[in-house]
């Protein structure tokens, strides 16, 4: 992910608007060089409020750490399993 893409992602995160964030993430993922795992790593390195969850081959975007943890628990996923699932999505 280049600096411009990271900047777009962080600006979207700061809006706390799920529609805006989803649009930016979708746009980033069109670039074959950027994967869901790349996006998640960038978000975590910047302590962003947005989290990605991979389940059943799908990608979900979640706002807030508490919501992220709740969804992982509902899906019976650990953060490590989620990260592995994001990596698998990256290969598709």
Image (cartoon, rainbow, N blue to C red):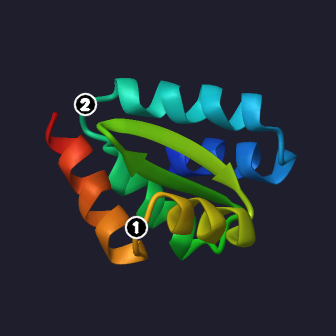
Q: Where is residue 47 in the image (x, y as percent from the top left)?
A: 65, 74
Picture coordinates of residue 40 (x, y %)?
46, 59
The residue carrying mark 1 is 77
Quote the CA–CA distance across marks 2 and 1: 27 Å
Task: Please report the residue visible at 25 percent of the width from the left and 30 percent of the height from the top.
Answer: 32
Question: Which-is-in-front pick, marks 2 and 1?
Answer: 1
Secondary element at image label 1: loop
Q: Do the residues labelled 2 and 1 touch (CB within 8 Å)?
A: no
Out of 49 and 74, give the one closest to the viewer. Answer: 74
9 lies left or right of 26: right
Label 1 environment density (alpha carbons within 10 Å; few <14, some 14–19, many ≥20): some
Image quadrant containing the C terminus = top left
Vertical arrangement, residue 27 with respect to residue 69, above or below: above
Q: Residue at x 46, y 58 (%)?
A: 75
Q: Quadrant of residue 12?
A: top right
Relative horizontal placement of residue 47, taking residue 72 as reference (left or right): right
In this orientation, which residue lies closer to the viewer: 92 or 33?
92
Q: Position of residue 15 (x, y in %)?
A: 85, 45
Q: Name the residue under label 2.
A: 32
User: Which residue occupies 39% across, 49% down?
Assistant: 54
Q: Which of marks 2 and 1 is nearer the N terminus?
A: 2
User: Badge 2: how crowded within 10 Å, few (<14), some, or many (20+)?
Assistant: few
Which residue is found at the position 51% from the left and 64% from the top? 72
Judging depth in this view, the residue of 39 and 11 nearest the camera is 39
Image x and y of residue 63, in percent: 73, 54
Q: Is residue 30 left or right of residue 23?
A: left
* Position of 30 relative to 36 (above/below): above
């Amino acid at each position: 992910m280049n600096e411009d893409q990271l900047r777009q992602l962080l600006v979207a995160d700061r809006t706390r608007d799920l529609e805006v964030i989803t649009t930016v993430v979708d746009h980033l993922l069109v670039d074959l060089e950027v994967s869901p795992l790349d996006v998640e790593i960038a978000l975590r390195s910047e302590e962003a409020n947005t989290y990605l969850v991979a389940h059943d081959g799908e990608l979900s975007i979640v706002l807030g750490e508490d919501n992220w943890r709740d969804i992982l628990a509902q899906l019976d996923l650990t953060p490590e399993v989620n990260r592995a699932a994001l990596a698998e999505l990256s290969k598709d």
